[in-house]
Image (cartoon, rainbow, N blue to C red):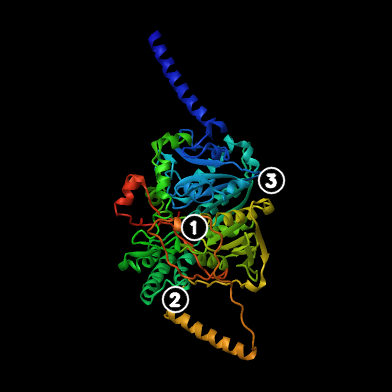
Amino acid sequence: MRASQLAWLAVAGIVQLSSLTIVQAQQKVADDYLVTSLPDLSAEESAQIKQYAGHMALDPEQESNLFFWLVTSRRPQKNQKLVIWLNGGPGCSSADGYFLETGPLRWVDKKLTINKGGWHEFADVVFLDQPVGTGLSYTKQPYLGTMKEITTHFMAFLKAFFTVFPDRAQYDLYLAGESFAGTYIPYFGQGILEYNENVPAGERFYNLQGLAIGNGWIDPLHQYTSYIPFIEKYGLSTPALMESMNAQQEACLDAIRRQDLITQNICEELVSIILRSNSETSQCVNQYDIRLLDRYPECGLNWPYELPLMSVYLNRPEVKAALHATAGDTHWSECSRRVSIALQQDDSTPSIALLPGILEKIRIMLFSGQQDLICNHIGTEYLISNMTWQGSQGFQDIRSIGWKVEDKPAGEWKQAKNLTYVLIYNSSHMVPYDVPLVALDMMNRFMGLDTKLQTFTSSLESDADNAVPSGGEKIDISQPKSSVSANGSAALLFVVMVIGVVIFVIVRKNQHQKKLNDGHNGVQWFPLSNNNGNNQSIGRDHRHAPIDELDELVVEGGIHDSDDDGEYEDFLSSGDRRRSPSPQRR
């Protein structure tokens, strides 16, 4: 009898101990996540950054964990800000944001150093690897297959995060990111707003103020149909390429007529056709930055050049230990093919459907790097021009605003009815990578911070001479396109324009239409020459586009998944860098 009682007590003790372990894990405090130092970063530079990192459990069994990296503000303001940064993919790590874009650190000449354009200057910034299976996040469950599931996990993360960092719950909250995050962010924003409408008893209200999306994948219809005008505008088209693109776009529109999905495999082929157009020369345009040439079939998949440095660094045991990321035995890779594949059957509505409702409540900023192909600015401008919110379509007669950073033209702004659109000169799919101070100034302005406190100068002022009316072609998917080719339509339009100009000159002698300012160099602190030798400058003169001409659409491609390809170096040397069935929008 005593033996059985002892056995029962032993079992009960084990159960209690297990429960205690789980409770203790859930009751972690902020100091448990404190990053005291990082390998390869000097003590002086480490002292300039206060940060926290580690895994946040999403369920009591701790089977699903998201990795976060919080960087605290260097100069917090009265109304403190919290930005959650998301990269896309789906399945691409937000370490891209931390080390290449908006984070506190950058590699310069292969040395880790302080990023002067880090968004933590006036705000706390969280870099989040999501959904589970991305970057250093992990799960024992199947990967998620719908935006509803991913949104549920994100909401669970918010609850866990503010439990550990309760003081941040009162901060002004912003969601920001790029590329496929243009799908994530509206879903997450709507999830927060719906939650706030009926906050459960004893739970926190989330002080969501705005959404910021760079080169975002938002509206498949208008973004897929932007590739043809984009390659025509930037001199990438040839007669043979246009013939292939027109035929493929018709097939793409047929697929969208049947069902409007977030991604369409037949439509993704539009990008592949562009990249293959010069494959006989073993060269192709970099799909993320058309100023660069690359070897076929990489076409930008290994860009930026720092990616191998990141892979080696984030897989070092001492780095993972410093980040409290040793659980899950996770090998870091930039993008997870498995996460992307799990979402291929997702029939969720494209996020464009969510924007009008969100704009009724909070502000949204869409920004586009001018040199991006895959999620180009023309697609973003088309979707804005064809979207109806707050009772009217597009920006109507709202004019663009000139913008300078350090006395150099940085881009153009339009804003009305809670929506801001920013076209950024001299920048790629990853805007903060090319022009970090420009991106920082943009975000600070969006958050309402006093830009006079910045360590650099900037100005935003109306410029009626450079203003252009809102536009954008209305895409009608109810009927197939007419038999008139795109080239024929363009030629007819050109003739009409020439006639109009001649009449105008006759009637109004000595008057000349002012040309848009040309040759904007932007502000670039990390020159293109830092990229690897496979990316060569094309050397074209890319005149900046008017705000409402669809110029750049971001579709991401860097698929480096250790689950499928082994170590990153083996992947690079294998020669097998094919695109996944659904391209990555990182």
Which quarter of the figure is the N terminus placed in? top left
The spot of residue 331 in percent (x, y) is 38, 41
**Label 3 to label 2, Cα distance in Å?**
51 Å
Residue 419 shown left or right of residue 141 in the figure: right
Please provide percent x and percent y for residue 414.
62, 65
Which three-letter amino acid code belongs to the residue tagged 2? Lys
Name the amino acid type tagged 3.
Answer: Asn
Q: Nearer the viewer, mark 1 or mark 2?
A: 1
The label on residue 79 is: 3
Which residue is pictured at 58% across the width and 73% down the height? 516
Q: Is residue 1 visible?
A: no
Nearest the viewer among 196 and 537 is 537
Residue at image location 57% in from the left, 49% down from the top? 116
Viewer-side residue, 270 vs 6: 270
Dot 3: few (<14), some (14–19), or many (≥20) neighbours within 10 Å?
A: few
CB contact under 8 Å: marks 1 and 2: no
> Residue 9 location, x and y as percent?
44, 15
Query: Helix or strand or loop: what does disc 2 sit on?
Result: loop
Where residue 460 sits, quadrant-wise, is bottom right
Please tell me in which quadrant of the rendered image residue 514 appears. bottom right
Residue placed under numbered mark 2 in the picture = 481
- Residue 450 image point, x, y percent: 69, 52
Binning the other alpha carbons within 10 Å of mark 1 as few (below 14), some (14 to 19) or many (20 upward) gives few
Q: Of the residues shown, which amino acid type is indicated by label 1?
A: Pro
The residue sitting at the right extreme is: 78
Tell which of 413 and 347 is nearer to you. 413
Q: Is residue 443 left or right of residue 42?
A: right
Question: Left or right: 358 with respect to 277?
Answer: right
Give the answer, above or below, for where 285 lies relative to 432. Answer: below
How many angstroms separate mark 1 from mark 3 (CA)?
35 Å
Q: What secondary structure is marked by label 3?
A: loop
Circle 1 sits on which residue?
527
